[in-house]
Image (cartoon, grey):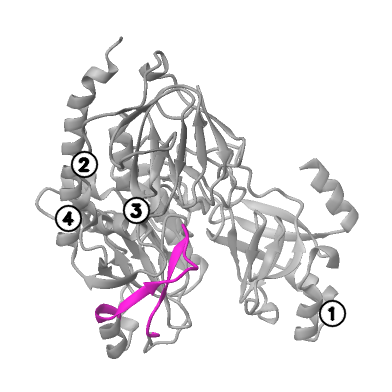
Amino acid sequence: LSIRIIHNGISDTIQDAGRYGFAASGINPGGAMDLVAMQVANLLAGNNKDEAAIEMHFPAAVFHFTEPCLIATSGADFNMHVNDQPLPLNTPIIIAAGSIVECKKLRSGARCYLAVHGGFDIQPWLNSYSTNLKANAGGFNGRSFKKEDILTIHHSPFTTHNSPLTILPWHADVSAFYEQPQTIRILPGNEFDQLTECAATIFQGNSFTINSQSDRMGYRLNGIALERNELDEMISSAVTKGTIQLLPSGQLIVLMADHQTTGGYPRLGHVISADIPKLAQASAGTAINFEMTDHITAEQVLMQQQLHLQQLENALTFRNQHLFQPA
Amino acid sequence: MIFPRIYSLGDNAVTVEFGNQINETINNQCIAFTGSLTEQNFRWLKDIIPAYTTVTLIYDTISTKRIAKNETAFSFVRETIVEMIKNIQPATALSMRKITVPVCYHESLAPDLNEFAATKNCSIQQIIELHTSKTYRVYLLGFLPGFPYMGTVDPLLNMPRKKTPHLKIAAGSVGIAGLQTGIYPLDSPGGWNIIGQTPLQLFDPAKTGPVFFHPGDEVQFECITLESFHQQKKCS
């Protein structure tokens, strides 16, 4: 019951909803960049939504499945194929024993999540399956997949009988999570007021382009350099996923999943949780705009997303019922 | 400005700021508040980030919003903090651990030591003496798993971060940045001036408590020979 890595990709890691409770030790949460996509893939594959999944970047690894499995992908469209047959995103698929799963082309987005029914047989580190690449811990041996790695999967009803490739006749509509991909809503940061009046206007009115030095730690942005009234150094304090920091050069960085726990650069704003998934799917070269909002709106939009996920979960529980009955 | 001050750090985090300078009194308040938060064991609280002068609460926005009913999750958390601060005990009874950290200041383990001495116009021996002459407090852990931000060094050792960071600093390397001193727990790129190395292992993911230091620890560096370094390295 395993998946063998035939070729490795540039960075394919196991991620879950993140490792919380250890920030005081300098251990950051990590976890899926696009949590919604990871959760949708899991729900489609009949898993608990926060089960560990494989986060892939393009070019991604090529996987060989020894046994039949129920799988699903969500997030970026990497033109996934099983044995040279194209497969839809956001759709549960039963694949046959010996199937080869590969991603042929980067069509849209930046990160694709592969969930396998039953989940992976790996050990959690500090209560989470997320891979912490810096610490070399968590996930699969604390690192991204290499050629010839073998990832064991838990036994599931699909591993007991051999069925041909079956694309199940339902899918998840995820468009609501990624509307207006260029507009990133933010809440003001504690040091926002340090910007000059002109810089504050530019920050909220102009667009900033994600540059190629962007990764799981953070997105560096190109744009008009922003100036501050105060030039005092600040005392290092907490930062979170979505914190927008102003670098000494006047350029911006948005911290993402593998951010450090603390930072010493001025925090101009914080991306609202509901807009992190679309930011996580924005690739280098994308221009984004920051739009100031308030806590009421930020929480309302997040609760709507949660409701949408809950509805999907309910619908899939009903749909999947017959799949999990003993043969 | 009046302290403690509470501010938002996005839609899932709130920060309490106890002051605006790096000193032990303010840091004690952070450590004490972190302790009482941990004791409360709030179900909506996901993580706590104590720093020099601040404590940040990372909350689960969805479950907090459900408890908060008509108000926002943010104001619910803020009010909870306001209530807690009213009852906070003065942080006098903190039990500080005293830890001696062996450091080898041999140039083979200290890539920046010669330049450091040259810039400061003093001998390597003087730098070692100054660095080992006082105890340092661990103000917080951050940057890397188990990386202690300690301070403050003698003003004569004040040295800005390197303009061009090292691509790889070895685990155990002891560095100085401004008035801070710290130890890299893992191999990592970094901009601190490396003046020595400890044979201690400061991060071990296989351990239940994977990091060596805690905020509030009192650290004394002890100069050891290269021979002793290699011996202790073998044992740890």
In this picture, is B146 found above or below A203?
above
Q: Which residue is mark 3?
A: B58
User: Mark 1 to mark 2: distance in Å?
Assistant: 64 Å
The amino acid on which the numbered mark 4 sits, given as a three-letter code, is Val
> Any mark on residue A309, and which?
2
- Viewer-nearest of discs 1 and 2: 2
State which region is magenta.
A203-225
Whether the residues at callouts 4 and 1 have beta carbons within 8 Å, the answer is no
Q: Are marks 4 and 2 on the same chain?
A: yes
Of A72 and A33, nearer the camera is: A72
Label 4 Cα neighbours within 10 Å, binned few <14 / some 14-19 / many ≥20: some
The amino acid on which the numbered mark 2 sits, given as a three-letter code, is Leu
Q: Is residue A17 visible?
A: yes
The amino acid on which the numbered mark 3 sits, given as a three-letter code, is Ile
What is the x, y in percent for residue A92?
30, 32
Chain letter of the residue beneath label 3 in the structure image: B
Q: Quadrant of residue A168?
A: top left
Q: Are marks 3 and 4 on the same chain?
A: no
Identify the element where label 2 is drawn: helix
What is the x, y in percent for residue A214?
47, 65
Whether the residues at callouts 2 and 3 have beta carbons within 8 Å, the answer is no
User: Mark 2 to mark 3: distance in Å?
Assistant: 22 Å
Identify the element where label 3 is drawn: strand
Q: Which residue is mark 4?
A: A301
Q: Residue at x 80, y 84 (%)?
A: B118
Left or right side of A32 for B213:
right
